[in-house]
């Protein structure tokens, strides 16, 4: 196995453990991941965390609350990602 492959595998293993159920419920961790991804403007990460939020049972109200926090932290530059987030959330619910 190449060095890069080992590090990638380690990263994904850590990522899975960080977002798993623990002292903070996985549902809230995924919402935090969504907020961070929106502020960082990472489209792939935003989509991933929206899907995980859905899988963890995040309600519509919780989803709106989370992305509202992202807007306040990230400012107006987050607005295009906020629109995409609503679109993705709506598609998942169809």
Image (tube, rainbow, N blue to C red):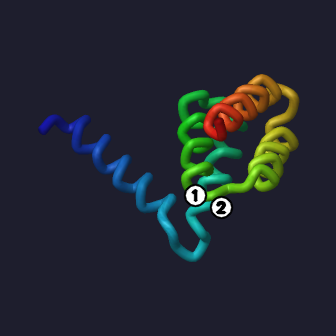
Q: Position of residue 48 (x, y in %)?
A: 54, 39
Say few, some or many: other residues with alpha carbon within 10 Å of mark 1 (under 14 / 14 to 19 / 20 or more). some
Q: Position of residue 50 (x, y in %)?
A: 62, 42
> Viewer-proximal residue, 43 or 61?
61
Q: Position of residue 69 (x, y in %)?
A: 82, 48
Q: Tell me which residue sits at (55%, 52%) in the image.
A: 55
Q: Where, quadrant-wise, is the N terminus in this rendering? A: top left
Say if 4 sits above or below 52 in the image: above
Hey, which quadrant is residue 36 in on the image? top right
Say few, some or many: other residues with alpha carbon within 10 Å of mark 2 (under 14 / 14 to 19 / 20 or more). some
Q: Which mark is residue 28?
A: 2
Q: Where, quadrant-wise, is the C terminus in this rendering? A: top right
> Viewer-proximal residue, 46 or 4?
46
Extreme front residue here? 94
Q: Tell me which residue sits at (87%, 42%) in the image.
A: 72
Residue 8 shown left or right of residue 89 in the figure: left
Q: Position of residue 27 (x, y in %)?
A: 61, 61
Residue 69 shown left or right of residue 41 in the figure: right
Indicate the secondary structure of the residue bearing disc 1. Answer: loop
Say if 10 sits above or below 1 in the image: below
Q: Tell me which residue sits at (80%, 37%) in the image.
A: 74
Q: Which mark is residue 56?
A: 1
Q: Are marks 2 and 1 in contact (CB under 8 Å)?
A: no
Tell me which label, 2 or 1, sits earlier in the chain: 2
């Amino acid at each position: 196995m190449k060095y890069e492959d080992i590090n990638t595998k380690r990263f994904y293993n850590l990522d899975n453990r960080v977002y798993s159920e623990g002292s903070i419920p996985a549902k809230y961790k995924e919402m935090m991941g969504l907020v961070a991804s929106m502020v960082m403007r990472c489209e792939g990460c935003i989509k991933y965390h929206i899907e995980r939020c859905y899988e963890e049972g995040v309600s519509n109200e919780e989803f709106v609350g989370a992305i509202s926090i992202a807007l306040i932290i990230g400012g107006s530059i987050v607005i295009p990602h906020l629109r995409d987030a609503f679109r993705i959330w709506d598609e998942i619910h169809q």
